[in-house]
Amino acid sequence: MSRTSTEESELFNGPQKVSATEECIGPMRLTQEPIQVLLVFAKEDGQSDAFWWACDRAGFRCNIARTPESAIECFLDKSHEIVVVDGRHSRYFEAEAVCRLIRATKRSEHTVILAVVPQTPSGQEEQSVLPLLCAGLSRRYVENSSVSACYNELLQIEHGEVRCQFKLRACNSVFTALDHCQEAVEITSEDHVIQYVNPAFECMMGYHKGELIGKELTELPKSDKNRADLLDTINNCIKKGKEWQGIYYARRKSGDSIQQHVKITPVFGQGGKIRHFVSIKRPHSDNNKQVHKINKDGEHSQSESHSLRHRDRRKESVDTRSISSRGSDAPSLQNRRYSSVARIHSMTIEAPITKVINIINAAQESSPVSVAEALDRVLEILRTTELYSPQLASKEDDPHTNDLVGGLMSDGLRRLSGNEYVFSKSTFPNLSQSQLAIPVTLNDIPPAIAEMLDDEDQWEFNILELEAATCKRPLTYLGLKIFARFGVCEFLSCSEATLRCWLQIIEANYHASNSYHNSTHAADVLHATAYFLRKEKVKGSLEQLDEVAALIAATVHDVDHPGRTNSFLCNAGSELAILYNDTAVLESHHAALAFQLTVSDSKSNIFKNIDRTQFRTLRQAIIDMVLATEMTRHFEHVNKFANSINKPMAAIEESSSNSEGSDSEGPASIRNSPENRLLIKRMMIKCADVANPCRPLELCIEWAGRISEEYFAQTDEEKRQGLPVVMPVFDRNTCSIPKSQISFIDYFITDMFDAWDAFASLPGLMEHLSENYKYWKGLDDMKCKSLRPAPPP
């Protein structure tokens, strides 16, 4: 490798490939931009070239310095994580001297310095590394001009010393936060030797940290106001790895006692052993009777500490306000804060989950250790926000499933870029009635289309043939037929002409340019919804208002869909994502726009003749069903349906089959409760929305191709705009459509339709699902990535 010769102080900027390192300490994420490497070589040779190309391969940014002076100048400018110093030729400079110069700067504290040393001649004893270490060098590298050897050395440094240094840098930030924390913090070793106290602790206890660090807690004076066995109680609790909270009297340096609210948390380290204890302490106000009980003699009731020892760790928070904010009014502000906390804990309003947690906490007090530990695990599960979402395996196990989950069940990576995805005005057509065809009645539908619609009550109804016959306007025609069959106009007291205008406006606001999310998809979901509504158990569970709401919700559920996922819109910083705070963006837009379009013109307002109360009930039901199609709560809806409807009904039916004269009204009472009717409607529209894998094979294949094309187009646009690629497997050049369908069926479809079939009885659908799954598996086994097998040669 040849380079133009330069002045000896000149620096060479090396490879600029970006490679970020990410690490975590507990909940704290450490992100480091591409690692910076400085090569200090007096002359270019095979060894310097090897390190240069190794940096290129590793994605590190590289600079070269020819002299110690230029090395210091470059280091002060870039703060490199790794410095490689040539120690083979002492006639140019001493590696130890260069290292001392770098170590003399404050920025070198977290830098790894590597010395390249010559190979030891055969027969000679290898020199000691001690002089190099004493000079500040981190490690040595025996001369080897192989790029792979240099690359391996750099990777070992990155994954070893460099990542450790990243963590040490983060620790500096954590200790800065602790130094400015208003609550007293004390950290001790596993043997209760004090390792750290923050300024708030010094202020509270009257000690200087120099008087405390290195001392055992037993060496400090104790207050005689604590119950005799309190320390044993605390130690027994924390040695088991459990957090302890309660009231404790500590003795200040001045000799007086201070009543504190204390929380002690064990910290586990290497080997799963307790390595430290973190104590957070704050003064306890004697006047705060709402938090702590005072007995008749004025002594604090020590039973309080027993009741607090298993308290939920998340109920207390560290107040990280700056110490500098303390002034003459600080005590009153602090008392006011704790008084507010006391009022909150004394409130009688409790959420159901809070009651459950409180019951479990109470049960732990009198339970054997094994049961208490099991209940601890139960509490940890209950405190998560994703109670209904299963945990995925690693991304390498099934990238198709992971990408589908990431793309469909999240609202983006929350990383906004400068690229804005803004809907064009054509996305929101402002159609006036004069632009629409003159409404005609159902009897005026062309005979060929009317003949097709005669089969709309069959699950095998071919919506794609209707799409072709109606010039991509199937929703209006199918809507007229289905709405008439269910008596929607009679229920709403609106004319068929009003309904026709409304259907046309809604259909006009679907994007025909979308390969999947267009009015044909809406018509398909409407057809599935109507089919489900005719099933005996579904029909017997719902009222007519529920049926009308379901049909309307199916019709409008994807209106004005842009053909992009919620994740895409959030990442692109779209106007809709900003409007709806990155939460259920599209579903909120579909519901809102549907009502906006409906009520904006009397000629298409199908709700204009119903009373306000009925309208609000209907509107709420429609909105709830449209929002249920959002995938982030998919497993919540499915599990609630199974647990609240499937399982109780199965238990009642099993009981009635084992005894004569049982109450046959039991299952109906379960289905017909308002809460369960809500779950049925949500489940119904969810199944209708993604019923493609349960359609006849040819329809299933066509829909799979359409949704894949839409995802391909999104990936293309993400790459074009420089946005995060939400579903990398949907690259049109590499994607396996059969694999994506298999993953979608396995993860989203099978369990949901098993639950829905158990309720609605849909053997035909389940047979199609099984056949279609076998079809995709067959293609995957043949390593075929397309929709259909390759034709024989």
Image (tube, rainbow, N blue to C red):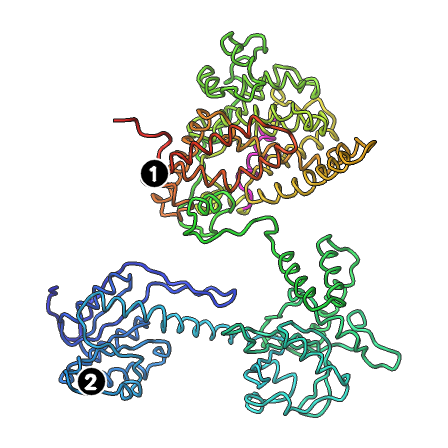
SS at mark 1? Answer: loop
Quarter of the rendering occupied by the N terminus = bottom left
- The image quarter in which residue 778 lies: top left
Q: Which residue sits at x=70%, y=89%?
A: 222
Q: Is 264 above or below relative to 482?
A: below
Residue 721 pos. (x, y %)? 36, 44
Amino acid residing under circle 1: Lys
Residue designated by label 1? 783
Which circle, 2 or 1, is nearer the viewer? Answer: 1
Residue designated by label 2? 94
Instruction: Answer with mark 2 or mark 1, whichever residue precedes in sequence.
Output: 2
On the picture, is 376 further left or further right than 670? left
Q: Which residue sits at x=73%, y=52%?
A: 352
Q: State the residue in front, 599 or 378.
A: 378
SS at mark 2? Answer: loop
Q: Which residues are magenta?
A: 583-598
On the picture, is 520 further left or further right than 201? left
Q: Which residue sits at x=54%, y=78%?
A: 275
Q: Residues within 10 Å of mark 1 (few under 14, many from 20)?
A: few
Quarter of the rendering occupied by the C terminus = top left
Is residue 584 within the magenta segment? yes
Q: Residues within 10 Å of mark 2 (few under 14, many from 20)?
A: some
Q: Is 33 above or below relative to 201?
A: above
